[in-house]
Image: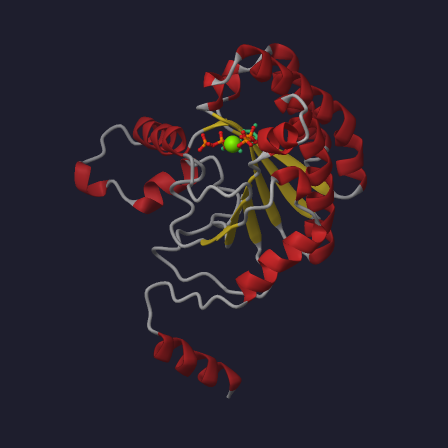
Amino acid sequence: MTQHTSSTLVIPEVSAIPRHVAIIMDGNGRWASKRFMPRVAGHSEGLGAVRKIVQECRQLGVEYLTLFAFSSENWRRPPEEVSFLMKLFLKSLKGEVSRLAENDIRLRLIGDLSRFDSGIQEMVQFSEEKTAGCKGLTLTIAANYGGRWDILQAMRQSLVANPSLEPEQVSEELIQPYLSMAYAPEPDLFIRTGGEQRVSNFLLWQLAYTELYFTDTLWPDFDEAQLHIAFDWFSQRERRFGRTSAQLASESLSDAV
Ligand code: IPE
Ligand code: IPE
Ligand code: MG
């Protein structure tokens, strides 16, 4: 497995198209309420936006797309909504896996899957195995995921692997391999639809140097054109990673020589 180093330790390569895009798909409930439909109708409609954005990222050469589907806090929702989301999750895994494999898209799940029923757990395993050899795009679905859970489980695993560790030996390099997205570089671009400007316990560790983009568009309305706007915005960011603008300018001059 390729190891990726933290952006706080090594400055990553920068390109106009983000290598890794992470999205909080928010606003499904409001999309439905505006149309006098039940909230869950917004979740079904949101699946259409997922299909569009996955295909477009694949076409544009994005290497990793990570979608927040269900947070560790979303269990607090009304039981009928949670159970609808679980059914939709299982149904979409079943319905989409062949299409993903045909399009050379690898599917991975992150989050504490032990809380899901066995039908979902088995389908997750089947889908990951079926797409394991795909190389076009890695699509990660975060389900029962929480950023703090991720950091804690990585710390626990690293302590189990190194039981005689002294406190001063605890480092980023030690924890990094146990984070649930250790297989991917950190996100270059974070997108949140639905108007809220918060991170809601998504990839807390991995967002250290990610560009954050917020749009009022509700998730079911987010389409290819909206994604292009986000990518254009991203391409205009100056990613300094702690350096000054003048340092960046002199580096690009020396690269050109
Ligand atoms: C995001 O849309 C989907 C999930 C959290 C599963 P919401 O359901 O949060 O939609 P709003 O924010 O209530 O409009
Ligand atoms: C975040 O959306 C989680 C997902 C999109 C899966 P929420 O709508 O649950 O976020 P908060 O609770 O309003 O911050
Ligand atoms: Mg919401």
Vertical placement of 9 versus 130: above or below?
Answer: below
The residue lying at 32 percent from left, 26 percent from top is 160
Q: Is residue 181 left or right of residue 147?
A: right
The residue lying at 54 percent from left, 49 percent from top is 215
Of 184 and 249, the residue lying toward us: 249
Q: Is residue 185 left or right of residue 8?
A: right
Residue 9 is drawn in which quadrant? bottom left
The residue lying at 68 percent from left, 21 percent from top is 88
Of 62 and 42, the residue lying toward us: 42
Residue 174 locus on image (x, y percent): 33, 41
Query: Is residue 134 among the parts visible in the rendering?
Result: no
Vertical placement of 203 versus 84: above or below?
Answer: below
Determine the residue located farthest toward the bottom in the rendered image: 257
Vertical placement of 191 versus 41: above or below?
Answer: below
Residue 201 is drawn in which quadrant? top left
Query: Is residue 179 among the parts visible in the rendering?
Result: yes
Residue 27 locus on image (x, y percent): 57, 35
Residue 203 locus on image (x, y percent): 44, 40
Residue 164 is drawn in which quadrant? top left
Residue 200 locus on image (x, y percent): 42, 35
Q: Quadrant of the N terminus?
A: top right
Q: Is residue 197 left or right of residue 58?
A: left
